[in-house]
Image (cartoon, helix red, strand yellow):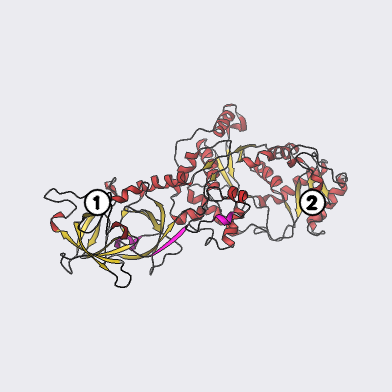
Amino acid sequence: MTITSTPVPSFIRNIISDDLAAGKNDGRVITRFPPEPNGYLHIGHAKSICLNFGLAADFDGRCHLRMDDTNPEKESVEYAEAIMEAVRWLGFEWGGHLYYASDYYERLYQFAVELIQAGKAFVDSLNAEEVRQHRGSLTEPGKASPYRSRSVEENLDLFARMRAGEFEDGAHTLRARIDMASPNMNLRDPVLYRIQRASHYRTGDAWCIYPMYDFAHPLSDAIEGITHSICTLEFEDHRPLYDWFLDQLPALPHPQQIEFARLNLSYTVMSKRKLLELVQTGDVSGWDDPRMPTLVGMRRRGFPAAAIRTFCERIGVGKSDSWIDMSVLEDCVREELNESAPRAMGVLRPLKVVIENYPEGQVEEFDALNHPQNPEFGTRKVPFSREIYIEADDFMEDPPKKFFRLGPGREVRLRCAYFIKCESVVRDPQSGEIVELRCSYDPETRGGSAPDGRKVKGTIHWVSASHSLEAEVRVYDRLFSAANPDAEAKASGGSYRDLLNPQSLEILRGCRLEPSLAAATADDRYQFERLGYYCVDAVASTAQVPVFNQIVTLRDSSTKGG
C-alpha cells in the first residue's frame, strides 16, 4: 500500500532538506521506527510511525523497523508481532528492513570491549543502591566509584567472566567512564551492561548480560546507517550520551538525533506501564479494549487507519509539549467515515409501532441510498411491514414546542417510506410504561412526500419488526473522567485509576438493525442514520449474537431532531 499525502512543513523536514542541500550523508535519508516489544503500540506511537515512514517516503529514502529488544523480562514474540501488524495496518511497509537490536548483541559486546581497551569503560562492583548514592543530584556532583580505577586488563577479565556467567545478577555492571561531575546526569558514568539471567524471546539463554537501551540504541542506529534518528523530547537530555558513544567509535557512521514533542491526548494515559496495569487489573478487557488508546483497540473500535494518519498529519510536529483534545482525533474519524461509510438504519432503544391501517401480512421494499452524497455507492432494498421499531426517544407523550418527532396526534416522515401519525399508546399494565404505539399511515405519501403539499418537520429512522436483525451495540465514552488523569491524580494524592470513567461503556441488548447488516464484516463501517458510526466487533460478535461497536457519534447531535 502506498500512502500519498501533501508533506506538512516542520522543523525536522527543514533539517533534512538542509542536509540534502549540503550533500550530507551522500544524499541518503534513512530513518527508523524503533519500538521496544514490551507492549502494544498506542496512538502516540502512531505519530512517530507516520513521521518516520512519511519523511523517508517524501525524501525517497527508507525507514527501518527495529525492535529495540534489550530487556528480556518484559519483551515477547506476542508484542513484536503485534507491532509489525500495527505498522502494516497503518499503511506502512519496511520492505526488507526489519531489524532487531538482539541481532547486534555480539557486535555490541565487542564495542563495549573496545571502550574498555580505550579506558572509556570499567566494571563496577557497587550494588544498585550504592550506585544511586554515588550518582549525586541535580545540585550536587556525583562521586566516583572506588572501582573506577581498575586496570584495562582487570576490566577485560571481569567483563568476559560476566558474559561467561560466573557472577550472580547484580554483582557487577559495566559502566562508561565519562564525568561524575557533569550537570547532565546521563553522563555520570552510565551503566552499559548488567547481569540478568533471563531468557530472551529470540536469543534464549545464549546471554546472561544485556546492554542498556542508551548504549544499544545509538550503536544500532549506526550499524544500520541511519541518517536521522528521530525521537521524542524526553530523549533530548540523552543526546550528549548518544553522541559520546558514537564519538568513541569513530569507525561507525554518526546519525543525527533530532527530538520532537510527544503526543499527549486528553482523557487517556499513554504510559505502557499504566496501560498494562489497566489490563492486568481488569479495568479493561485487554490491550484491544475499544476504549484503550492502543492501535489494536482503536482498530477494533472501528477507527480507520486513514483517519489516524490524518490526525497525525493535522497535529503537526513541534518542539514543545502540548495537549491535544480527544475531539480532534474523533473529528478526523468522522471526516473519513462521512466519506467512506455507507448508510444503514439501526434502532438502539426500540419502541414498537403498529400501523393499524396497513394491510396485515403485506411487505413492500423501498430503495434507500447507501450514501446521499455519493451515487456510486448505489442503493439497497429496505423491507417495510405493518409492525416496525423506532427509537424510544423519537416519541414523547407530552412533547415540548421544539420537539418535531412523534407524539400523540402528530405526524412524522419515516425515512424513505411514509408519513405516519400516532393515534394511541399501549402501556405496560404493571409499570405504566409506554411499550407500543398505535399509528396510521398515509399511503399517498410513499417515498416521503405528500401529494397535497402538506409538510412534516420530523424525519425518523425505523426498521421492520419481522425483518430486523437483533444485535448488541456497545456505546463508548472517554476512558477517564479527567482530561489529564495523571495530573489530577497527583494533585489529589490519589491514583490515576481513581479517575476511570464508570460510564465509559454501555452495552445495549435487543437492538434492531436493518437486515442488510447481517452481511457486515469486521472491516465494514456504517453510519447508522441519525445516530453515529458503527462496525462489527471482531472479537465479541458471533453468528448468534452480532455485536456492533459505536465508533463515534455524529458530529452534530441536532441532526437527530429531524
State how far apart marks 1 and 2 are (Cα). 74 Å
Residue type, mark 2 in image: Thr
- Name the side, left or right, on which 369 lies relative to 44: left
Do tag 1 and tag 2 residues touch (Cβ < 8 Å)? Answer: no
Q: Nearer the viewer, residue 421 or 174?
A: 421
Q: Nearer the viewer, residue 30 or 551?
A: 551
Whether residue 433 is situated above or below residue 169 in the rendered picture: below
Q: Where does residue 363 sit, x and y in percent of width and height?
A: 19, 65
Magenta stretch encompasses residue 45: no
Q: Where does residue 272 sit, x and y in percent of width and height?
A: 60, 53
Looking at this view, name the residue that lies furthest to the top: 22
Q: Earlier in the sequence, mark 1 or mark 2?
A: 2
Residue 449 visible here = yes
Q: Secondary structure at mark 2?
A: strand
Whether residue 297 is situated above or below residue 235 in the rendered picture: below
Q: Which residue is mark 1?
A: 458
Q: Where does residue 385 sit, x and y in percent of width and height?
A: 21, 64
Residue 306 visible here = no
Q: Which mark is residue 170?
A: none
Q: Quadrant of residue 253?
A: top right
> Which residue: 33% across, 47% down?
558
Q: Which residue is mark 2?
A: 173
Whether residue 445 is situated above or below residue 515 in the rendered picture: above
What is the magenta range? 496-520
> Which residue: 88% across, 44% down?
149
Q: Nearer the viewer, residue 416 or 370?
A: 416
Q: Quadrant of residue 121?
A: top right
Disc 2 packing (10 Å; few <14; some 14–19; many ≥20): many
> Which residue: 77% across, 37% down?
182
Residue type, mark 1 in image: Gly
